[in-house]
Image (tube, coloured by chain):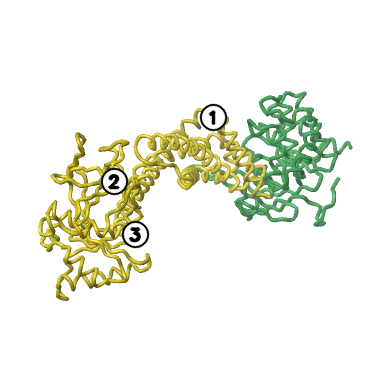
Chain colours: A yellow, B green
Amino acid sequence: MRLRNDLEESWRIALDALRANKARGALTTLGIVIGIVAVSLTMTAANGLQTAFRNSFSAVGTDVIYVSRFPWIVMNDFFIYRNRPPLEIRDAEKLAEKLRGRAIVNPSMNTQQDLKYRSETMPDVIIIGTTDRQIVMSDAKPEFGHFITDFDVFSKRFVCVIGPDVRKALFGDVDPINKEIKIGRYAFRIIGVMEKRGGGFGGGPSFDREIYVPLTSYVKAFGGNRGRRDVNIAVKAPSQEAMADLEFEVTGAMRQIRGLRPVEKDDFSINKLDTLVGTFNNIMGVVLLVGLMVTGISLFVGGVGVMNIMFVSVTERTREIGIRKAIGAKPHSILSQFLFEAAAICVGGGLVGVVIAAGLTAVINKLMMPASLSVGITVLALAVAAGTGVVAGFMPALRGARLNPVEALRYE
Amino acid sequence: MSGTNGNGSGSTLQLRDVVKTYVMGDDTVHALRGVSLEIKRNEYVAVMGPSGSGKSTLMNVIGCLDTPTSGTYSLEGQMVADMSEYQLADIRNQRIGFVFQTFNLIPRTTVFHNVELPMIYAGVGKGERRSRAENAIERVGLKDRMKHKPNELSGGQRQRVAIARALVCNPSIILADEPTGNLDSKTGDEIMTILDELHKGGQTIILVTHEDYIAEHAHRVVRLRDGHIESDTPTRRVSAG
């Protein structure tokens, strides 16, 4: 009952104090408002980037291992990898042989070419030479027509499957199936249009701008594996759980295929979406941390403002503290009274800050990138605000709680 | 005149050789130099003395706002001298009702809440708080001022609120420190009438004053000088009565 009474009384005093000093409370709160807006926007931005990133790569598939000449993320100096011999279609075929019945293997090559259809052009489109097995590597499906078949690959047909953005740019509303477009200098007949996947994170290439052609015709048109282009080998695991074993097996098989002696290092790289996501998350973690530190400073400054005003408040009410002590208030009652006041200022500021942050987030969402103020961030921001209040209020409150009642009563 | 109480001694409070010294900068101030005093239940005592005589210090010690440097103080059989701050707060809350010269109400807070406040710190539930506070306010004749704030009241009314607040926890003693000092004589008389009535109702009252006519309301006058008790005599009222 005492605790409940203390809390009720503290709450009442806090509200009274704020009501009595509206302008002062508002100005003090402003510091917290700015701090909370900054902190929650930082978290929102980091969340937004992460969402955008995840959307971009959701179509790649997390149960696929990619064997390439270079790692996706170069941690060391690039020249270490430069002297690696290129991966060839032959390597992919040998790997497929070794993994037969346990995993699906698909070689692919890519380049960038300009597209042309009648008077419409589209520069620097990613052309992927691949096989019919490409389609099982991810969730991507053709929306119209069909994907490349093994017969297309076998007979080196000049056919292609285009991304929805390519279709939109070159054909508008016209049905593109069976139309011929020029990829570089070669004419390809369109046999399918992929469904929309999104992507294009951070201005990077979008999946929707890609074109698939049979690997054999790709080699014919744009240079074979003897050229400067490498083959990427995708290996799809039968399940997510089998990924670790498969990675081990693929590494062993590739070393055999490449004729590496035990002392030699791998001359190829195993890439997974996991590592990419992991690296991205690490980077985002650092960005978020730095962001929070910088914005945290503004919250800290706000907190110092609150502490300052709480010292004023305690001094102003020295006599009142004396009265309360004389009629039986214990130190913790006085402490909680001032902590509540500080917390009320800060939570009030936090609420206003969250509302402003929500507004700004909506604007960002509309103009810049996918962003949303999650419930988690809101709760966290309010908790941080309340915490700031308690921390900032503690020293002043303690001073009040420790006042000698005789001296406090004598204070004018 | 002397009542009996539970512990059989009949005394509400007992001070023995109480010394209180303060250190102010380089000076040591001897506010009390060995005061022994016993006050029985339902006594009505006036403490008098010139300023600097140690009245206020004595009141602070009796009121448990301050602890003696040496000597003992027992309140209703409980030794107060070496109590913790928390225990002292409980004593102030339960056993002592303060009435100050400057009223010392909490500003911006209604009469009702001011009176209710000691019970909040005592941990009394809402319903009981309400009825007891209303009772106490009625007793000092301010039933129609319940929702007013101190700055909307006259000095006399404020002091009545303070008395209601002092009463509300049924204390062993009411300590009134120059309760009429800030009031005109007519209002002062009204306040003294209330105190007299409380005394008649069985309350122990200790009154600090330097007005003889106020002291005459009491039954016993303790005069202090330079930290000593100079005299301790019954008033005419008792001799006559």
Quadrant of residue A180 in the image?
Answer: top left
Residue B28, position as x, y percentages in the image: 53, 45
Q: Earlier in the sequence, mark 2 or mark 3?
A: 3
- Which residue is depicted at the point 73% across and 33% down? B161
Secondary structure under tag 2 reads loop
Residue A137 lies left or right of residue B94; in this view the side is left
Quadrant in the picture for residue B196: top right
Amino acid type of disc 2? Gly
Residue, disc 2: A163
Circles 2, 3 touching at the beta carbon (< 8 Å):
no
Q: Nearer the viewer, mark 2 or mark 3?
A: 2
Q: Is residue A41 visible?
A: yes
- Vertical side of B102 occupied by B172: above or below: below
Within 10 Å of the Cα at label 3, are there few (<14), some (14-19), or many (20+) other Cα atoms?
Answer: many
| Residue type marked 1 | Asn
Residue at 69% x, 29% y is: B181
Can residue A300 be seen here? The reply is no
Secondary element at image label 1: loop
Looking at the rendered structure, the number of numbered marks drawn on it comes to 3
- Subunit ID for the residue under disc 1: A
Which one is nearer the viewer's eye here, A183 or A43?
A183
Name which of mark 1 and mark 2 comes first in the sequence: 1
Q: Position of residue A6 (x, y in %)?
A: 63, 46
Say which residue label 1 marks.
A21
In which quadrant is the C terminus of chain A drawn? Answer: top right
Disc 3 from disc 1: Cα separation: 58 Å
Residue that badge 3 annotates: A62
**Chain for numbered disc 2:** A
The chain containing the residue under callout 3 comes to A
